[in-house]
């Protein structure tokens, strides 16, 4: 199957004062893949995906998505163009019900016309992450792991072409992580997934390819096998971490 | 016709206004700077200073100087005590939430105003100046007392400035302003600092009120304009910036004096209010304030 | 839409039925007082759109009330148009003013927003004084056009019953319209912007535009109330543009419950009745208002219906 490029960056750079958090990154993502970005704390992973989603403005370089230059496109239009983003720190509507949380995401795609269609889409997204039973609960009252799933459900309700997840399994129990892996496998059938993850088990279970970042640059890229065998990665990251 | 005497007179009047404004605006600015809240009742503290000053001075009718001196000491102290009560009773309980504070202090201002109306009545009350001195200019004589206001204000602001730089309280205030939590962790009694700052802000307004009564009379509605003008000064000077506030008070006091020579008071108010609203919209850090990242 | 919150919908219908029914039970002075309550309730409902639902605490809604009142009143007085047209002009005038102010004021948030809206409203008030020869200033203007034809029916606005029913119709239309808006996707969107603007932006919404839409809606409904007030009672004046008018909208909304559809209606009714009662006894009105503002922020920030909603009836929103 020919690989179609969904997202591509060239020379993407962002500085914070004297620190170059993302340093001239050239990056390519194919449609349909599940890609993990790994790297030590402060490597620039969150900043990089923040640039992709429009949360952070780039200093230099360009981003193309789905054949369109989106470098200067405001964040909310990127979401409409198909890039969904979930925050590293859980960011939901705590005072609203779980269903309402998902409905706000769904109506972003469907418009405010039909409440029935919005509700159906919201329910489908909640079902996909296994939250159907908690629909009427206040989102802020849920356990942390469930709140993370609400966040993922909001991403799904957008029916994105690209779903960006920033450390989605942080703070989850082993059982919740297993459920999460199953959820993402299902999502991957219809969307491209870009995942920042520290938990190597999750990475190995999900990722088709892995990008390793360090000091704002891409250190290595390849299949899980290639990455685990890469001596530079072992020296810089895997060796140090384990 | 020669314009010079008009300009001189307008300049002098502007200077007097600037002095009073500087005190009252510094009070507002201090409170905003340290506590990050806007006190809408600030104008009523000014009015209470004036009305309280009148009430105290009229207790010693035969000695204007003594009466004035007592007023200058006692009225601000009483207003300060009221401010502490308001801080403990209201602001602290709502956790200094910025929006709730505005709503609550609007309520406070309604109450103060109406209580003063019901106790002292709707009439304007005059206080005799502590001394009479007519300073001769080539074209007209000018009240020496008004120039005394300017001097007192300058001395007070100077003392405040030095005090805040040198004293322990000043240090604690800056620490609290910089980072409330850390200050608390370092053992700074943040609650007491807040009460103190709120009282100090109110007392500055009250002093301004006492100073102005011998020149302008006391009236229960007199707090409106100083509140608006203090807002203007604080916003133009940059919210929470003391040097900016002083500079803006002088600029605005003088230009207000001059504007009132050429424009009707209503038109002058329209222009200044509109300009300040636009400053807030387009340059939220004020004209003199340093650019800081917006929250 | 009805399906979405049927109990609230039923309650709205019951309120409307009670409003139309009240005139058969009451007569004379209470009808006049009720007319004012209905009109001011529209004002508070409009205010609540910005303050309660979208979380933008304005201190300047007197400006939009006055914009509606003056646009309608001046059109009626100088424009040789009938009352229904003047009413429409009032609504459009308020919409235009709230769009202009919204574009400027919404560049700020929270405290700055409160001060900026207050100042713009003050400018509006001062303008009505400055141009007193056309606006009537403090003295106000009486409007001579006091009737209109509704098809074959002539409506005489000097009759208390006619005024009441006109006010009741506008009130009902606004109430049902806002029910439809707030209980569906739009209301949810306003709440989303209020609760978490950053998340809302990252769900693909232009938060600035949603805020502007809520603000213009709010100002337009407030202006509808102003236009109705002026045309119904045949009088417009600067005092309606004063800061106190903004505070009244805030107070009614706070008392009844910000972010609840019927809260402002209840708040307006309670406060107007309370003040009428007090007005007979003492001149303590400002003290009551002041004490209530403090007490509500201290102990009752969600207001009556907001508290009931949180404790017992979650559908009351
Ligand atoms: N808004 C900011 N201002 C200043 N520096 C920042 C900002 N955001 C990130 N940084 C810095 O940029 C560098 C990269 O941060 P980033 O959050 O992208 O790392 P990360 O790879 O996501 O780390 P982690 O695994 O801890 O989440 C860090 O040194 C961080 O301190
Ligand atoms: Mg990160």
Image (spheres, coloured by chain):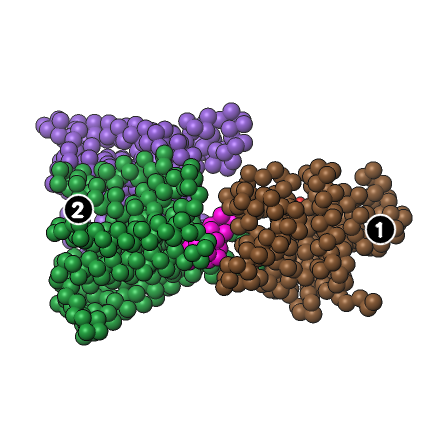
**Exactly how many numbered labels are in the figure?**
2
Decide if residue B201 is on the left or right side of residue A35.
left
Decide if residue B12 is on the left or right side of residue A237.
left
Give the SS element for disc 2: strand
Would you say the residues marked 2 and 1 are in contact, meaning their CB atoms lie under 8 Å apart? no
Q: Give the position of the N terminus of chain C as an image quadrant.
A: bottom left
Q: Which chain is green?
A: C
Decide if residue B3 is on the left or right side of residue C105.
left
The 10 Å Cα crowd at callout 2, few under 14, some 14 to 19, many 20 or more, is some
Q: Is residue A212 visible?
A: yes
Asked if residue C61 is positioned above or below residue A143 in the image, the reply reads below
Q: Nearer the viewer, residue B234 or C29?
A: C29
Write down the quadrant of residue C131 in the picture. Answer: bottom left
* In front: label 2 or label 1: 1
Write down the quadrant of residue B82 in the picture. Answer: top left
Q: Which mark is residue B142?
A: 2
Chain B: colour as depicted: purple
Magenta: main secondary structure equals helix
Chain A: colour as depicted: brown
Q: In 3D space, how far apart are the residues under numbered discs 2 and 1 (Cα atoms)? A: 89 Å
Decide if residue B210 is on the left or right side of residue A201.
left
What chain does badge 1 belong to? A
**In the rendered structure, does residue A231 fall within the stretch colored magenta?**
no
Q: Which mark is residue A224?
A: 1
Instruction: Magenta stretch: give its range.
Output: C181-196
């Amino acid at each position: 199957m020919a690989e179609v490029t969904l997202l591509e960056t060239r020379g993407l750079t962002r500085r914070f004062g004297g620190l170059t958090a993302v340093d001239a990154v050239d990056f390519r993502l194919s449609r349909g893949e599940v890609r993990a970005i790994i790297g030590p704390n402060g490597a620039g992973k969150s900043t990089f995906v923040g640039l992709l989603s429009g949360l952070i403005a780039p200093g230099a370089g360009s981003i193309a998505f789905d054949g369109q230059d989106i470098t200067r496109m405001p964040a909310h239009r990127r979401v409409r163009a198909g890039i969904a983003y979930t925050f590293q720190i859980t960011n939901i509507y705590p005072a609203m019900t779980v269903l309402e949380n998902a409905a706000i995401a769904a109506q972003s795609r469907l418009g405010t016309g039909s409440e029935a269609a919005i509700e159906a889409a919201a329910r489908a997204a909640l079902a996909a992450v296994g939250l159907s039973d908690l629909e009427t609960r206040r989102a802020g009252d849920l356990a942390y792991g469930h709140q993370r799933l609400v966040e993922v459900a909001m991403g799904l309700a957008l029916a994105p072409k690209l779903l960006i997840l920033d450390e989605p399994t942080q703070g989850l129990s082993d059982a919740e992580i297993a459920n999460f892996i199953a959820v993402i496998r299902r999502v991957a059938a219809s969307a491209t997934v870009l995942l920042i993850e520290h938990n190597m088990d999750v990475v190995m279970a999900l990722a088709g390819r892995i990008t390793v970042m360090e000091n704002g640059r891409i250190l290595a890229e390849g299949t899980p096998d290639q990455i685990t065998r890469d001596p530079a990665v072992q020296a810089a990251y895997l060796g140090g971490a384990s | 016709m020669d314009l010079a005497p008009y300009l001189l007179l307008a300049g002098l009047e502007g200077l007097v206004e600037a002095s009073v404004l500087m005190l009252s605006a510094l009070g507002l600015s201090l409170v905003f700077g340290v506590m990050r809240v806007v006190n809408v009742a600030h104008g009523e503290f000014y009015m209470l200073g004036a009305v309280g000053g009148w009430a105290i001075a009229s207790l010693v009718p035969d000695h204007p100087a003594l009466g004035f001196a007592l007023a200058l000491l006692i009225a601000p102290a009483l207003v300060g005590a009221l401010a502490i009560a308001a801080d403990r009773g209201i602001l602290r309980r709502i956790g200094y939430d910025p929006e709730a504070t505005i709503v609550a202090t609007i309520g406070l201002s309604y109450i103060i105003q109406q209580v003063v109306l019901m106790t002292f009545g709707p009439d304007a009350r005059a206080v005799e100046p502590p001394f009479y001195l007519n300073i001769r200019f080539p074209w007209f004589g000018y009240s020496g007392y008004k120039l005394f206001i300017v001097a007192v204000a300058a001395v007070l602001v100077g003392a405040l400035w030095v005090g805040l730089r040198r004293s322990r309280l000043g240090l604690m205030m800056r620490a609290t302003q910089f980072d409330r939590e850390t200050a608390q962790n370092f053992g700074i009694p943040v609650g007491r600092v807040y009460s103190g700052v709120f009282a100090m802000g109110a007392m500055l307004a009250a002093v301004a009120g006492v100073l102005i009564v011998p020149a302008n009379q006391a009236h229960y509605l007199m707090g409106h304009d100083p509140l608006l003008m203090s807002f203007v000064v604080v916003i133009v000077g940059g919210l929470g910036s003391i040097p900016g506030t002083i500079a803006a008070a002088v600029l605005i006091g003088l230009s207000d004096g001059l504007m009132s020579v050429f424009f009707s008071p209503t038109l002058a108010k329209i222009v200044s209010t509109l300009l300040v609203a636009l400053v807030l919209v387009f340059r939220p850090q004020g004209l003199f304030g340093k650019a800081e990242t917006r929250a | 839409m009805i399906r979405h919150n049927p109990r609230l919908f039923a309650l709205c219908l019951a309120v409307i039925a009670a409003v139309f029914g009240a005139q058969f039970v009451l007569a004379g002075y209470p009808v006049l007082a009720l007319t004012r309550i209905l009109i001011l309730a529209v004002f508070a409902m409009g205010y609540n759109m910005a303050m309660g639902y979208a979380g933008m605490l304005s201190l300047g809604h007197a400006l939009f009330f006055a914009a509606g009142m003056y646009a309608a009143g001046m059109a009626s007085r100088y424009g040789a148009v009938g009352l229904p047209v003047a009413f429409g002009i009032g609504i459009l005038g308020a919409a235009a003013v709230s769009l202009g102010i919204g574009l400027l004021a919404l560049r700020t948030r929270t405290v700055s927003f409160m001060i900026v809206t207050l100042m713009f409203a003050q400018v509006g008030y001062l303008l009505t004084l400055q141009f007193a020869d056309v606006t009537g200033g403090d003295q106000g203007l009486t409007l001579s056009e006091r009737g209109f034809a509704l098809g074959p029916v002539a409506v005489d606005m000097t009759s208390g019953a006619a005024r009441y029913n006109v006010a009741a119709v506008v009130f009902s239309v606004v109430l049902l319209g806002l029910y439809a808006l707030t209980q569906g996707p739009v209301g949810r969107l306003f709440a989303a912007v209020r609760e978490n603007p950053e998340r809302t932006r990252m769900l693909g919404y232009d938060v600035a535009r949603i805020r502007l839409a809520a603000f213009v809606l709010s100002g337009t409904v407030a202006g509808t109330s102003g236009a109705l007030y002026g045309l119904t009672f045949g009088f417009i004046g600067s005092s309606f543009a004063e800061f106190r008018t903004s505070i009244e909208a805030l107070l009614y909304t706070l008392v009844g419950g910000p972010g609840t559809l019927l809260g402002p209606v209840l708040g307006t009714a309670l406060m107007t009745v309370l003040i009428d009662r007090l007005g007979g006894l003492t001149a303590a009105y400002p003290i009551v208002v002041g004490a209530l503002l403090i007490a509500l922020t201290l102990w009752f920030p969600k207001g009556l219906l907001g508290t009931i909603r949180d404790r017992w009836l979650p559908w009351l929103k």
